[in-house]
Image (tube, rainbow, N blue to C red):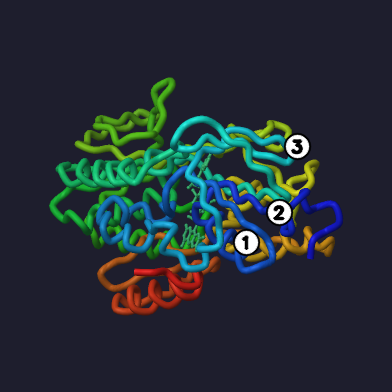
Amino acid sequence: MTRPGMTRPGMTRPRVVVAGLGDSGLLTAIHLARSDVDVLGVSSRPGLVSGQELGLRLARPERWARDYRIGFDRFRRLDPVEKVHAELVALDPAGRTVTVRPAAGGTRSVPYDVLVVATGVTNGFWRLPHLQTDADVDAALAGAHARLAGAGSVLVVGGGAAAVSSALQVATRWPDTAVTLAFPGERALPRHHPRVWSVARRRLARAGVRLLPRHRAELPAGFTADRITTGPVRWTNGQAPVDADAVLWAIGSVRPNTDWLPPALLDEQGFVRVRPTLEVPGVDGVFAVGDVAATDPLRSSARNRADRLLARNVLAHLRGEPLSSYRPPGRRWGSVLGPEADGLRVFAPSGHPFRFPAWTVDRLLQAWIVRRGIYGGVRR
Ligand SMILES: Cc1cc2nc3c(=O)[nH]c(=O)nc-3n(C[C@H](O)[C@H](O)[C@H](O)COP(=O)(O)OP(=O)(O)OC[C@H]3O[C@@H](n4cnc5c(N)ncnc54)[C@H](O)[C@@H]3O)c2cc1C
């Protein structure tokens, strides 16, 4: 299966380095580990800390952690993968090496035959790229939860899925807390089908969330939405400021985690340029997937499970065979609101919701579809 010239001296199998073991990198590593390649995954965290379901994570962190924070040693199919807890600091495409800074200090050079870039994005206070220990992750989860639990009023600023799910989950977790959701447009969720907002608006109203459409927050110079703040928040078109004990910023200030990559590989916004095959143009043997990959305007390859196609393409590349293309759907889809008392709604690209009844979420969806079907087995 090895393409002539791909094998390094003394090595019998090509080595694939997966940079970032978040949602997409982990799944890519799992697929590749079943093939005739050596897989090494570099992760700034000691386990999977998923970027999914922010609202649940804030409101019910223990429940969230059960499904979205999983030690690497619990994934059966990750057993053959060498896991390195380190931060990636440089790529040398000519020398085919990445430089990593392990938790223990110093730097180490890691050679690859194929590199998969899956370092995701930094977003708000909940998706940060730096090296973290388990204790750091514990502290971040508990700190945000305690901050919201102690607030009599919460203002969520933003109109995407992270904002909508946070407003709903906070309002249902703490019914006595006054929750407001402020967003700049006529409706929230502008990148989803309009039907999704119709459903979400009804769920929010039912939970007692006050909606403030057409409210764009004034951001002081140098403001970074990387922590929960206190009110008041002012608005760009002069509406009355809104006060709140806790202000949750989910304003989509997303930054790609690409500081460690040569600028020639990046687009104007700093995301990794990719062909439809997920190859990075201009550099042999480098692929990208997930939120960091500029596949389409929505950068949708994580939620559309391009990890499977990517793993196939990596193997085809090593064999010198033709690669397949990723075709993104035009609209966002998936879970928006997170698990509710009556179950979990998953929205199709057409905006139609499919509701998994509450009893099926743990016993069917998480146990069989996610842990067994998607990850191929997760130890207790
Ligand atoms: C199975 C599945 C289901 C999904 N369902 C939904 C859904 O229902 N609704 C929805 O909206 N979205 C869904 N998504 C998409 C999800 O919201 C995000 O798009 C996804 O979490 C992004 O994954 P990622 O691997 O690109 O980034 P991340 O999960 O953020 O992973 C990136 C990793 O790289 C690490 N990293 C960053 N920089 C460095 C560095 N320098 N050195 C070392 N490590 C670094 C980060 O710490 C992180 O661990 C789903 C995704 C998957 C895979």
Q: Secondary structure at mark 3?
A: loop
Q: Is residue 92 visible?
A: yes
Q: Is residue 214 visible?
A: no
Spatial separation of the CA atoms under disc 2 and disc 3: 21 Å
Observer-nearest of 66 and 354: 66
Q: Secondary structure at mark 2?
A: loop
Q: Which residue is mark 2?
A: 278
Determine whether the beta carbon of the residue marked 2 sits less than 8 angstroms from the nearest atom of ligand 1: no
Q: Position of residue 12 (x, y in %)?
A: 74, 58
- Which callout, 1 or 3, points at the residue further toward the start of the chain? 3
Q: Are marks 1 and 2 in contact (CB under 8 Å)?
A: yes
Side of 109 relative to 241 (left or right): right
Which disc number belongs to residue 95? 3
Amino acid type at circle 1 is: Ala
Q: Position of residue 221 (x, y in %)?
A: 43, 20
- Which callout, 2 or 3, points at the residue further toward the start of the chain? 3
Tell me how many marks there are.
Answer: 3
Side of 23 relative to 273 (left or right): left
- Residue 315 sits above or below residue 288 on the image: below
Residue 225's quadrant in the figure? Answer: top left
Q: Residue furthest front?
A: 10
Which disc number belongs to residue 230? none
Side of 38 relative to 42 (left or right): right
Q: Which residue appears at 58% of the width and 47% of the height?
A: 19
Observer-nearest of 297 and 97: 97
